[in-house]
Image (cartoon, helix red, strand yellow):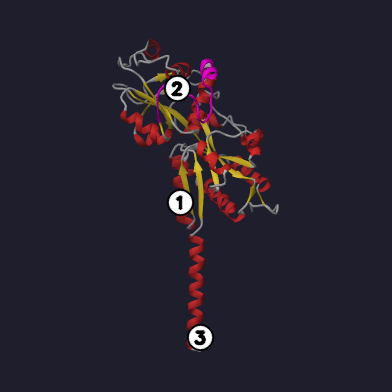
Amino acid sequence: MLNTTHKLGALIAAASLIFVANVQAVEITGAGATFPYPIYAKWAEAYNAKTGVKMNYQSIGSGGGIKQIQNKTVNFGASDKPLTQAELDKDGLMQFPTVVGGVVPIINVEGVPNGKLKLTGEVLANIFLKKITRWNDPALAKLNAGVALPDANITVVHRSDGSGTTFVFANYLSKVSDEWKTKVGADTAISWPTGVGGKGNEGVASYVQRIKGSIGYVEYVYAKQNGLNYALVQNKEGEYVKPGFASFQSAAKYAEWDKAPGFYEIITNEPGKESYPISGATFILMHKVQDNPAMAKEVLKFFNFAYTEGDKMADSLDYVPMPDAVVKLIQNHWKIDMKGKDGSAVAE
């Protein structure tokens, strides 16, 4: 009898270990935009500590994220370039926004302190169009009286990979420069008139740190975390506002998520004296019909955690969380749009 009891106890213990192992073995996979990588990594760490579920996110650029979700090689894709309803429908996808941030021009110019160089949208476009090639160009000198601009060549640094950060930046330039709109346009990958390419926000930040006289563009947190100098960009109202939570939030309030098909919203060059002009949301892409509903449910649980418990983490990195009303809208779309192959709802 004692031996039987020992065997039963051993079996229960083994079953418990198997159960715990299965819970710990859950690993969500995602890939895409480097723009939100810092906050996704922070959310993933907190969620793993709370639930034991891991979230493995590959920061490979929005273009790569779109391709990977189209090919079903990850549980979710991530892109700072929203897809139109037609693009979503073509691949059976749905999308939803997670946070809002901003893209800042970063510079490595000797003698110019952080946040002191001023740029209008047109001048910024002309630098990237290779029409302004020296730091003491009259157009720059006119905007920056009292700033000692060196007689030095400008080296442009841009993204070499498919990038939502590029899309946000180029979309802004298309709105403030007709020449940019006509000659270059806006997409995750564009034909750059000049410059050297770096992979990811990390690559651009690294190049600008190393190359004297350079200018690039990154999501604000990369500039902040790496101690990079950024330039101020004039907004639609003629103000030079500092990038950060407050100015991103000011731009974000003009987004009309409830009226946007498929949550397609672009918030560059928004009105408002406090608004940062190169603001943008970042998005998650998932299939509407899920081959593995149980895994899709785990993904939604993760993002539900991000929406309900991740706001302070987002704030700490100067990302703007989605307002409660928008979160409810997103959660409702999960329930309506996402199904298993049998037609049953994935979201609880």
Q: What amino acid is found at the position of numbered circle 1 in the picture? A: Ala
Q: Which residue is mark 2?
A: 233
- Point out the frontmost of discs 3 and 1: 3
Q: Position of residue 173 (x, y in %)?
A: 50, 21
N-terminal of the pair, mark 2 or mark 1, is: 1
The residue range painted magenta reads 178-197
Asked which secondary structure carries label 3, the reply is helix
Could you tell whether 312 is left or right of 148 in the image? right
Q: Quadrant of residue 154?
A: top left
Name the residue: 46% across, 38% down.
Answer: 34
CB within 8 Å, label 2 to label 1? no
Q: Which residue is mark 3?
A: 4
Reply above or below: 85 against 51.
Answer: above
N-terminal of the pair, mark 3 or mark 2, is: 3
Residue found farthest to the right: 343
Could you tell whether 117 is left or right of 164 in the image? left
Name the residue: 49% across, 38% down.
Answer: 33
